[in-house]
Amino acid sequence: MFDLMLDEDHVELEEVPEWIERVSRLTAGVANGPRDPQRRRQLTNALFLQDVGPELATEASRAGLSQPAFRTWLLTQSDEDINRMPALGIYREVFREKLLNPTTRWSPNDLLDMIYLSCAAGYVDEVVGERHQVAGIKNAMRRLGRSRVGVHRRLEGLVDALSL
């Protein structure tokens, strides 16, 4: 891992302008949407499922789940099941938090940061990331009742945690 972090070769970030435009419109729509917390949660959950739904459907099919069974799961159990999923639960909470913040300015690296930091936070003991992404991960973990992962804004914090 250290070799990867210290590698001086620059890897170009693939731009995803259509995703940024779409989530920016969604964020503005949520800001102008319902004020009731329950309705806002339902709305952001629907937007999350719209965003990851194709991948969920593909994996459900690969696992042998029929389309009607998948649809039933989406409507009846997905909310609780996704909360329990190590990475996807965190990703949904981070995505939801960003959607609910009307001042969110989406950037090209947000998607990658959300995916990889959520994945890391779901499966490792310590995570380091940029300030705004780390704040989202910490908030997501608090809302999900998870506390076993150390989340750090600086490498020094990680080193201190590993030194204990």
Image (cartoon, grey):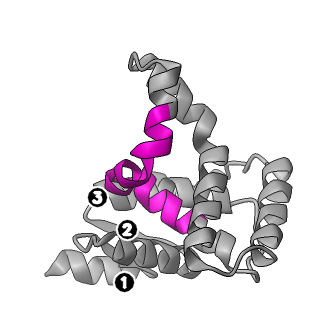
Q: Earlier in the sequence, mark 2 or mark 1?
A: 2
Q: Earlier in the sequence, mark 1 or mark 3?
A: 3
24 vs 143, left or right, is right
Q: Which residues are magenta?
A: 72-95
| Residue 117 seen in the current view | no
Tell me the residue at 67%/69% (across/down): 99
**Label 1 crowding class (10 Å Cα cut-off): few <14, some 14-19, many 20+?**
few
Tell me the residue at 55%/72% (across/down): 38
Q: Position of residue 93 (x, y in %)?
A: 50, 66
Mark 2, secondary structure of its residue: strand
Q: Position of residue 147 (x, y in %)?
A: 25, 74
| Residue 127: numbered disc | 2
Are dots 2 and 3 in contact, CB under 8 Å? yes
Q: Which is in the foreground here, disc 1 or disc 3?
A: 3
Reading the image, the residue beneath label 3 is 124
Are dots 2 and 1 in contact, CB under 8 Å? no
32 vs 35, left or right, is right
Number of callouts in the render? 3
Tell me the residue at 77%/77% (across/down): 31
| Residue 156: numbered disc | 1
Q: Quadrant of residue 22?
A: bottom right
Amino acid of disc 3: Val
Per the model, the C-alpha gap separating discs 1 and 3 is 18 Å
Q: Quadrant of residue 128?
A: bottom left
Tell me the residue at 67%/54% (across/down): 47
Does 31 lie within the magenta span? Answer: no
* 151 vs 2, nearest the viewer: 151
Amino acid of disc 2: Val
Q: Which is in the foreground here, disc 2 or disc 1?
A: 2
Per the model, the C-alpha gap separating discs 2 and 3 is 7 Å
* 12 vs 31, nearest the viewer: 31
Amino acid of disc 1: Glu
